[in-house]
Amino acid sequence: MAYQIKLSAPIFNGNESIYIQQAVDSGHLATYGSFIDQFEYKLGALTKTHQAVALNSGTSALHLGMALLGVSHGDEVICQSFTFCASANPIIYLGATPIFVDSELDTWNMCPELLEDAILNRIANGRKPKAIVIVHLFGMPAKMNEIIEVASKYQIPILEDAAEAVGSKYANRHCGTFGELGVYSFNGNKIITAGGGGALISKNASLLQKAEYLSMQAREDLPYYQHLEIGYNYRMNNLSAAVGVAQMEQLHQAVKRRREINQNYRQLLNNMPGIKFQDDSDLSESNYWLTTVLIDEKVMGFSNDQLRIKLMKNGIETRFLWKPLHMQPVYRGIQFFGGSIAKSLFHSGICLPSSSDLTFDDQSRIVQLIQDELAKSFK
Ligand SMILES: *Cc1c(COP(=O)(O)O)cnc(C)c1O
């Protein structure tokens, strides 16, 4: 269905077409070219302390990142349950087993206490986890201070899935810079896009060098093709990077807009009982990639699904929150530490339209429809 108001539409009102033309004129559209260098430079400059390797998706960045942390056949990797499948699928690609951990109610991301329970349980079983995948869901930074404390106590590296959190900050540092390795995604509906794309970021230059080498089929620097290792075809191409560079020029503005949109929703919904937002903590500054709310059905008289259908009928696209991975049929039987927090978030939550070019009038219309639905339930 063609929605009038989309959940998260990309915006190309910068230098995208100019840079695409320059890439075409340069004759480099494949995995070499100046836009790839510029894109990596811009990502490094954004985080100030880190360097980046541009890849063809966030999923491939997660896959390479785990491989670089030494995850291999028979290992166990702890992963946030409340996330998109791409956070965990690479664990399976590598022949390892995920261990899922529930969220906490403040940030909706991994609960540090449950993380420690999971680690202690696995160590007691002689299976010390090889890595921890932390996710900043919908752009909201996880409780990194607490999580790092647990991870360093047991000396387990963190792979930060910041796919949704480009431009988000925690304690004045960009998400993605807290783990051994961080992952960004530039897929089509993320806060900025390269059409498709991803990046690994790190302070560890030799690890990134290895990532670049593996992303281009692990080819030795010789006049003929020689390989000492199995590599991947995961490098970003110069055409995507051209779009990525133009979008990076707009990142600051995009974060500003999405935070404004989140603020407008809060104002328009005006502390409506029965609606709860995902809130920043004192330490965090979410990019609010998507504005997400929980609908208390008992108070509102309608469910998240009823609201989704109502808005859909009015040409407005919404989406459920991610269905937790421990509830996914494909991950049946995988060990899970926690209770029902991620599950209840999934059952009551909804993502509201959050495109950077959403107008105040559009937002007022969406909120009016929510208020109409509320009035209808109590007529
Ligand atoms: C989008 C996303 C990914 C994967 O990124 P792609 O670029 O689509 O491969 C991974 N994790 C999370 C949480 C995401 O939202």
Image (cartoon, helix red, strand yellow):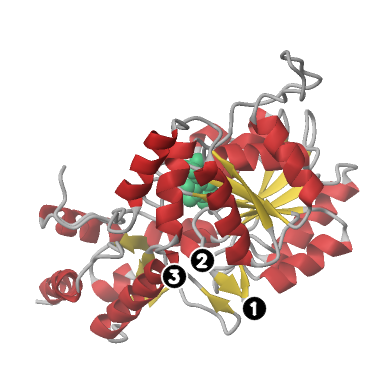
> Where residue 201 appears, x then y in whole percent?
66, 53
Residue type at mark 2 is Gly
> Where residue 50 appears, x then y in whole percent?
69, 60
Label 1 Cα neighbours within 10 Å, binned few <14 / some 14-19 / many ≥20: some
Q: How many marks?
A: 3
Which residue shows up at 46% across the image and 48% down it? 186
Residue 229 is at least partly visible in this image: yes
Residue type at mark 1 is Ala
Q: CA distance from mark 2 to mark 3?
A: 7 Å
Residue 84 is at least partly visible in this image: no
* Residue closer to the observer: 295 or 212: 212
* Residue closer to the observer: 82 or 201: 201
Residue type at mark 3 is His
Horizontal arrangement in the rendering, residue 15 relative to residue 71 (left or right): left
Q: In front of the other: label 3 or label 1?
A: 3
* Residue closer to the observer: 302 or 188: 188
Q: Is label 1 in a helix, a strand or a loop?
A: loop
Task: Give residue 252's mark.
Answer: 3
| 6 to 195, vertically: above or below | below
Q: Is mark 1 within 8 Å of ligand 1?
A: no
Label 2 Cα neighbours within 10 Å, binned few <14 / some 14-19 / many ≥20: many
Q: Quadrant of the N terminus?
A: top left
Task: Give residue 167's mark.
Answer: 2
Residue that protrudes farthest toward the front in the picture: 25
Mark nearer the N terminus (3 vs 1): 1
Q: CA distance from mark 3 to mark 1?
A: 18 Å
Cβ–Cβ under 8 Å for marks 2 and 3: yes
| 214 to 308, vertically: above or below | above
Q: CA distance from mark 1 to mark 2?
A: 13 Å
Q: What residue does disc 1 label? A: 171
